[in-house]
Amino acid sequence: MSSPSPGSGVAVLGVAVPTPLRRLFDYRPGAAAPEGGWQPGLRVRVPLGRREVVGVVVECRAHSELPLDTLKPVSACLDTQPLPADWLWLCRFTARYYQHALGDTLHQAMPVLLRQGRPLEARTRERWQLTAAGRDTSAAQLGRARRQAELLELLRQHPRGVVHSVISAQGFARAQLQGLADKGLASATEEPLTAVPAPRQGGLLAEPALTLNREQAAALAALHEGLERYHPCLLQGVTGSGKTEVYLQLIEAVVAHDRQALVLVPEIGLTPQTLARFRRRFRVPVVALHSQLTDAERLDAWEAARAGRAPIVIGTRSAIFTPLARPGAIIVDEEHDGSFKQQDGLRYHARDLAIIRAHREGIPVVLGSATPSLESLVQARAGHYRHLQLTRRASHHAPARLELVDLRGRRRQGGLVPPVIDAIRQALAAGNQVLVFINRRGFAPTLACHACGWLAECDHCDARLTLHRQPSQLTCHHCERQRPLPDACPDCGSADLRPLGTGTERSEETLAALFPDVAVHRIDRDSTRRKDALEQTLAEIRRGEPALLVGTQMIAKGHHLPHVTLVVVVNADAGLYASDFRALEHSAQLLVQVAGRAGRAEHPGRVLVQTLHPEDPHLRLLAERGYEALAEQLLEERRAAGLPPYRHLALLRLESPREADATQLAGEAAEALRDWLASHALAVDCLGPVPAPMERRQNRYHVQTMLRSERRGPLHDACAWLVRWLEAQPGARRVRWSLDVDPQTLS
């Protein structure tokens, strides 16, 4: 092995590159070292096979296991300063905990432009303003320079200056600006395009904080106690209890201490309203991070947070990887929501990483929800989280109770039975709005032949095709393949093809026919594909005119709809009897969340839940005693069954176009793992392999094996061994496999 180059002490750089391989690649420094020398966190451009990629230096060493003269040199160093050490630590923890390649983890945690090698620097713009001499100069003194005189007057009207793009839009040219500058009458400064510090003469708040009730004030006082340390809190508040106001006043204290707050929300649809409310409240920059930003906008927001110019950062799950210069608090709103779990690639859970990050940085973390996850409830009851509760609504009305409506033997129109239609009519007649919730897109769940019973099924998945009317087609919501509507049944030739079941489009059509004088707004993924479509629809709804809202869970989460007094759940049964052990928990959370849209203002709310199983004990418990009582029962059932949160799980998923390949590798992996567990006396159960709940999806066969243990340590040892075993198997190259640690779904 060659010795390190003299004087530097660094002969080898361990670089993480974006590949699925779970190891670092050794390179010689090659390129000139940055001013601060080689150190972890620097981005470098390196050769990999026949191409060049952007990687991140993770280790700087004097030795390599390979001869130094066989190592390729780094082509270029892309940074003058390394990426933040805390960010690099979080990425390394994430890769280790979720058994994912570090190079790909770092790649996913960076904005796209950084992955491509763009410098990490703020985009800037010019701001022009008058100098002291300019303020003392009149337009008349400029003589025949008429346009310069007009520009002088424009700048005089804006003491804080005018950005160059606005000046250009007024018809002024660079020559006129330069003319004023040459005379010493105007000057330009460069300012960042994003998160420009605002003047604070009026204080931190742009509008006054609301008066807190006793419960809110007690919760805020408890949060203030932990501002200077790691302080995990579960803020459990009924819908409409004012959790957001508690967040706002906590953030006020954080920003007043010159620190930054990171707020995670589960859906992109919630980001605009959250941003608007926070920007109305504070005079400091508030930036957003979510998937609908352009690559340049995302890099600008990321850089503003890293540099500390953005005291408040709001984003969806990937925002957990946003570096903060002065972290002060992390808030996870709707912490129970499944959207915080990434379901492919790097399968991390943003809520869990928020806890880890807050612990590492010694700051408070707040998990807010009306229906906390069972994992968070157990942590709170064990004393690991402080449990803060808000039991009263800000409107002083009690939360609406669920009223079960029996569907059995009743005629339906668009999925609705006559008593429910009458209740809708009464609510509209009173000048209120009605939310009809159906968690199924499209016109109907599928198309059926009334003569022979044929059902429209996907050729590539073990799933039925959903009937859509806008446009008219059959679509698989698993693989997104589309098919035109058949003219006749492909089995018997009958033309009597009928929609089976109800989707949002069918409910919309039925309600429009029943109430022709009332606006009907459909809110689902299909109707909100256009940018800003959701915000425009919500703006119409908030005008307060009588209206019918038909939507999926997009409308159930977090939205404040003050004019909705009646919520109708078209079919509560779909999620209650699914094979996934979390299905009942998730369905109950969704029902309570959608029920919380009713009666949030001056009028009390009512919630009608249609079901074919009104005597179901879980459903009755939820309706009569609420989510807390149901959660208590579910926890007892989970304890007895050895399921989370009392056991920890990992799920090995394998898929292949050839069923035999996936099944064979899954069997060999399970057998090898059981032998290894027995030889090491580790208390880990290996269950399976078994076919996935949807065995065939996108023409690939899916098989899975579950690992279960009381303790995380042995489970992670088993996962690490299994990953190494799979990487060494030639047969694994014919099968796509992934390991999901702490899976939120078994599908």
Image: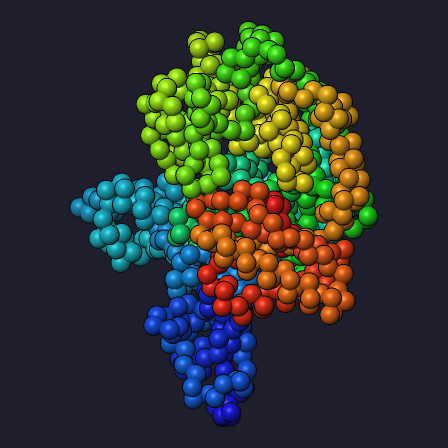
Residue beneath the point at 40% across and 81% down = 73
Q: Position of residue 346 (x, y in %)?
A: 53, 56
The relative height of residue 529 versus residue 449 in the rendered view (above or below) is below
Along the line of sight, the residue nearer the viewer: 80 or 335: 335
Image side of residue 412 versus residue 333, left or right: left
Along the line of sight, the residue nearer the viewer: 164 or 93: 93
The relative height of residue 108 versus residue 271 in the rendered view (above or below) is below
Q: Position of residue 357 (x, y in %)?
A: 64, 57
Q: How many marks?
A: 0
In this view, which residue lies farthest toward the left? 144
Image side of residue 63 versus residue 586, left or right: left
Residue beneath the point at 35% across and 53% down = 126
In this view, which residue lies farthest toward the right? 382
Is residue 468 among the parts visible in the rendering? yes
The relative height of residue 307 versus residue 454 in the rendered view (above or below) is below
Q: Which image quadrant: the C terminus?
A: top right
Q: Position of residue 183 (x, y in %)?
A: 27, 56
Is residue 139 among the parts visible in the rendering? no
The relative height of residue 378 versus residue 530 in the rendered view (above or below) is below
Image side of residue 575 versus residue 198, left or right: right
